[in-house]
Amino acid sequence: MSSILTNNSAMVALQTLQSVNKGLAKAQNVISTGKEVATAKDNSAIFAISKVMESDVAGFKAISNSLAVGEATVAVASAGAEQIVSVLKEMKELAVAANSETADFAKIEADMLQKQEQIVQIIAASQFNGVNLLATDVDGNGGTQLTVLSSLDRAGQNDSTNANPPTVSTIDVAGVDFEGALDVAMRTSITNVATAATALVEIEGYLQTALEGAASLGASAKRISDQGEFVGKLTDALKSGIGALVDANLEEASARLQALQVQQQLATQSLSIANQAPQSILALFR
């Protein structure tokens, strides 16, 4: 039956055209944003997962900055400790030379005093951003260690029914307190062979303390450096995972767009033909 009031073919053609236009709009949006899942309505589950991962990536960026500052702080202290070790070795050489009756004790003691002052200055200068791991008061507020953010740990899924917020891990670097442990001003003054022998024993003790402190700071610096490298790789892996979830396959999207453009043309022509069909009824009245 033909009717000029109800055009079923036109309705079907219109529905097809609307469907094609909807698909075309989605394909254009995918290409323009570069994402298969750009909003929650595209895929609510994937969208939620990607946003949680993106928040973790932002957290790891802050942790990377903390590790970089921590590494620089420990590196400065470590350089100071190593320099102090060198100065103490020179003081030990002077003390050994003073264990001879022919030594010029006055000149040796004068050199010792200069090196003592040098050690004090090195300790005071070995600070980064107000933190000095060689001092008794590490941060100027009575602190004895440096705390560095090292990781953001999450166990299990985090959603409204199973809340598992991430926890922050830290690396604690203890200060070596060279101010208190290396009070070289308290050593025995060298005036003769006997005092030189006593000073040598004292300086040897200072040297061992300095070596232990330098080794401790070096180990902490290596740990922070390794953790920084790991966090960088982890951040890259998270970004890659997010991309795998939400990024569009642009080759596939391009092919889909071209196919939909052809379908749109055909659907438009089909609707045009369907709309012209009732005009054939006029021939019955001629």
Image (cartoon, rainbow, N blue to C red):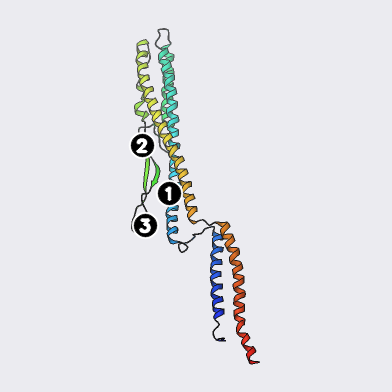
Please name the amino acid that badge 2 sits on.
Gln
Split into 4 quadrants, where in the image is the C terminus? bottom right
Q: Do the residues labelled 3 and 1 touch (CB within 8 Å)?
A: no
Left or right of 64 in this view: 187 = left
First of labels 1, 2 by sequence position: 1
The relative height of residue 189 versus residue 211 in the rendered view (above or below) is above
Q: Which amino acid does label 1 sit on?
A: Gly
Residue occupying image coordinates x 34% and y 27% = 181
User: Is residue 128 something one can see in this rendering?
Assistant: no
Badge number at residue 131:
none
| In this rendering, the label closer to the viewer, 3 or 1 | 3
From the image, state whether disc 1 or disc 2 is nearer to you: 1
Position above or below: 42 against 79: below
Above or below 140: residue 25: below
Residue beneath disc 3: 159
Dot 1 alpha-carbon crowd within 10 angstroms: few under 14, some 14 to 19, many 20 or more: some
**Looking at the picture, how far across and down is residue 171, in whole percent?**
38, 39
Which residue is label 1 attached to?
Answer: 59
Mark nearest the camera among 3 and 2 is 3
Q: Quadrant of residue 227?
A: top left
Name the amino acid, label 3: Asp
In the image, 18 versus 184, the foreground residue is 18
Q: Which mark is residue 145?
A: 2
